[in-house]
Image (cartoon, rainbow, N blue to C red):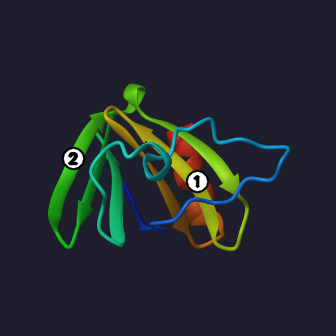
Amino acid sequence: MSAWRVHDTGLVALPSRFRRLAGLVRHLQGQGEAWPDRVDLAITDGELRASAGGSPLGAWPRRDVAVTRVSDGPPVSFVLELPGGAHLLAAAAGGATDELLAALS
């Protein structure tokens, strides 16, 4: 099992006029349940699992999850697309975050 701690920014990165987020972020569309400020992600048995403070937020088959890097940071910002919503998340720049994004790509 691999695990990472990420931060739900609660904000939308303002894209430049040359880049669009295509309305995928829940904050733009009002889709999906808002997550707590700090979220733990783990990939186990082909599933992405999200929890906060030990309480599960959900689990999704890896094949149903997509990630898009928005900013190299620091912090690194990325959109995590899940069935039923998308979340703009941030995590510390470095090897662990690169490993997370690679695992979700």
Q: What amino acid is found at the position of numbered circle 1 in the picture?
A: Phe
Residue at 64% from the left image edge and 72% from the top image edge = 75
Which residue does the image show at 34% across and 53% down from the upper left? 42
Where does the image place residue 65, in percent across and percent down from the top left?
A: 42, 34
Name the residue: 27% across, 51% down. 33
Rendered image: mark on residue 26: none
- Determine whether, in the image, residue 5 is placed left or right of residue 61: right
Residue at x 34%, y 66% (from the top left corner): 39
Residue 62 place in picture, x, y as percent: 38, 32
Which residue position is annotated with label 1? 78
How far from the left and from the top, in percent, is residue 49?
28, 48
Q: Is residue 91 above or below residue 61?
A: below
Mark 1: few/some/many CA within 10 Å (<14, 14-19, 20+): many
Q: Where is residue 98 drawn, in percent x and y? A: 63, 56
Element at badge 1? strand
The quadrant the C terminus occupies is top right
The amino acid marked with disc number 2 is Gly
* Front one among 83 and 13: 13
Write down the quadrant of residue 37 in the picture: bottom left
Answer left or right for 9 relative to 56.
right
Q: Residue furthest left?
A: 55
Q: CB under 8 Å between callouts 1 and 2? A: no
Question: Residue under circle 2?
Answer: 58
Q: Closer to the camera, 42 or 15?
A: 15
Label 2, residues with CA under 10 Å away: few <14, some 14-19, many ≥20: few
Which of the two discs, 1 and 2, labels the residue nearer the N terminus? Answer: 2
Choose top left, top right, bottom left or bottom right for residue 6. Answer: bottom left
Q: How far apart in space, not on screen, are marks 1 and 2 (Cα)?
A: 19 Å
Decide: is 67 above or below 70.
above
Does 46 sit above or below residue 78?
Answer: above
